[in-house]
Image: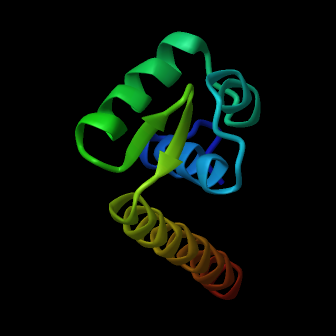
Amino acid sequence: MRSKRDKFDIVADILENIKDGRNSKSALMKNANLSFSILKKYIDYLEKNGYVEEKEGSYVITDKGLALLDRLNKVRNLEFQLAELINELSKELL
């Protein structure tokens, strides 16, 4: 298991939190475990590319953002399945 989150994990965490209603900057910082500067960097990117929109001080995930989140979750699941398979093979071969 990885110890650090990569950019895909961070984007997925932000989008998941927004989807679940934790959509203010302070809630996102707390629940996605991000500093303000890192959150701003990612939120700016997500807004610029149409994955989220800011409405009255909080963020809303767009349909495009939901589609991205779905794909990111599929990648996470595949990574988990691959890690399990590698672990099984390692036990079998050693």
Residue beneath the point at 70% across and 49% down? 21
Q: Nearer the viewer, residue 30 or 21?
A: 21
Q: Is residue 19 left or right of residue 60?
A: right
Q: Is residue 18 left or right of residue 10?
A: right
Residue beneath the point at 51% across and 47% down? 60
Identity of the residue furthest to the front in this view: 56
Question: If the image is split into quadrants, where does the C terminus sit?
Answer: bottom right
Q: Is residue 44 left or right of residue 6?
A: left
Q: Nearer the viewer, residue 64 or 31?
A: 64
Identity of the residue furthest to the bottom in this view: 92
Residue beneath the point at 47% across and 72% down? 70
Q: Nearer the viewer, residue 40 or 85?
A: 40
User: How far across and down, in percent of the image, does residue 61 sit?
Assistant: 48, 53
User: How far across and down, in percent of the image, does residue 41 sit?
Assistant: 39, 21
Residue beneath the point at 66% across and 32% down? 28
Vertical arrangement, residue 94 with respect to residue 1, above or below: below
Q: Give the quarter of the image for residue 80.
A: bottom right
Vertical arrangement, residue 59 with respect to residue 20, above or below: above
User: How far across and down, in percent of the image, does residue 69 sit?
Assistant: 47, 63
Q: Is residue 94 left or right of residue 53?
A: right
Vertical arrangement, residue 33 with respect to residue 89, above or below: above
Question: If the image is split into quadrants, where does the N terminus sit?
Answer: bottom right
User: How far across and down, in percent of the image, does residue 34 sit?
Assistant: 63, 24
Number of marks in the image? 0
Q: How is the image coloured?
A: rainbow
Vertical arrangement, residue 31 with respect to residue 70, above or below: above
Identity of the residue furthest to the top in this view: 37
